[in-house]
Amino acid sequence: MPSPFRPSRSLRALAAAFAVATAALSLTACGTSGPTTTADGKDVVRYQGTTGQVTAYELAADLGYFTKINLHWEGDTTSGPANIQAAATKQIEFGSAFNGAVVKLIAGGAPVKAVLSSYGADDKNYTGYFVRDDSGITSARDLIGKKVGVNTLGAHHEFITREWLHQQGLSEAEIKQVQFVVLPPVSTEDALRKGQIDVAALGSVFRDTAIARGGLHSLYTDKDLFGQFDYGTYVFRNDYLKDHADAVKDFVQGTARATRWLQTTPHDEVVAKFESIINKRGRNENTGLLKYYTSYGVPVPGAVIAEREFQVWIDWLVRNNELPQGKFTAKDLYTNQDNPYDNGTYPPTSGPTGEAVVAK
């Protein structure tokens, strides 16, 4: 009998890309540089960063929270799915992506597991889906046949839009008539204002600068759907988790503590620290956008992963016949075992060194 599992186009593409990359790596293994150690015995952990931004793990390194690993920047990533694919194919040790994309990559055969939340929506930081004030678009039904600008397919922006349309009562046939157009975040607002797209997914600085220029308003937001919620995670390959358990543990504890530092430190101090880190790393980056920083966006203390943050997307994929019922449970896909805010090392809502938190 044919399988009831019918992967979406984006899942098939992601799985195919993973298979091709894996095959290429197997043919060139002799020339591929894998994990190494420093002269003093620390594991070198390769990663991809983001231009003009500081991640929680880069902050952890600057704060001295790592004792067993040494981070090594391999360049900047283009999207979450590309980042975790790079991790799955051993170009880097870990990656970060939207949890729905993580589920899809694992369903496509990637041997990875999530270890820590990496981004989300809180009371200050979220993704809005904006329309022009004069567009005449006021409801989900108005999006049938329209174009939505997103940063990549098969990830956060597409999932949230499809879920919102579903919750607003559109049928699957109607939802399929909504077109997704891939645009760099830096160009998305301009495309909306010029009428090249009808809806623009905008977050962080791109959202705030667009609002400041006026003429746009959000039709829906990710926070409207789920409230304060962790949407993405850091993933490591299963073989790395097994062979470099101490390195992973050090990464998780340090990054969790750095996330907690971001959650408990005054805004201006955070921005000053980010500017210092960007200037020190010498990548010729512009620090001007830091003035728009509001919060890190991870609402859960210490970035502890919650079961519902994966289960909601598993259920979504099952409902859309993109994942067979019962193939995964959420707990198959992540672990909190190394997170000090979940494993008993620190009280769950304590500060970055386990201290009581004083209200800001």
Image (cartoon, helix red, strand yellow):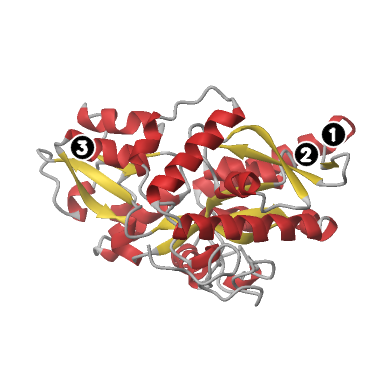
Residue count near mark 1 (Cα–Cα under 10 Å), binned few <14, some 14–19, many ≥20: few
Query: x, y (%) of residue 41?
Result: 87, 46
Q: Is residue 95 above or below residue 305?
A: above
Residue 120 visible (yes or no) = yes
Query: x, y (%) of residue 229?
Result: 41, 64
Q: Which residue is mark 2?
A: 23
Residue 203, by quadrant, is: top left
Q: Is residue 344 above or below residue 57?
A: below
The numbered dot on residue 27 is 1
Residue 257, by quadrant, is: bottom right
User: Secondary structure beneath disc 3?
Assistant: helix
Mark 3 vs mark 2, CA separation in Å: 48 Å
Mark 2 vs mark 1, CA separation in Å: 6 Å
Give the quarter of the figure containing the N terminus. bottom right
Q: In the drawing, does residue 203 fall left or right of residue 339? A: left
Q: Which residue is mark 3?
A: 212
Residue type at mark 3: give it.
Ala
Q: Earlier in the sequence, mark 3 or mark 2?
A: 2
- Residue at point 68%, 70% (across, down): 337
Q: In the drawing, does residue 15 fall left or right of residue 155? A: right
User: Secondary structure beneath disc 2?
Assistant: helix
User: Which callout, 3 or 2, points to the residue nearer the camera?
Assistant: 3
> In this orientation, which residue lies closer to the viewer: 20 or 150?
150
- Residue at point 54%, 74% (across, down): 348
Q: Earlier in the sequence, mark 1 or mark 3?
A: 1
Residue type at mark 2: give it.
Ala
Residue count near mark 3 (Cα–Cα under 10 Å), binned few <14, some 14–19, many ≥20: few
Residue type at mark 1: give it.
Leu
Residue 111 visible (yes or no) = no
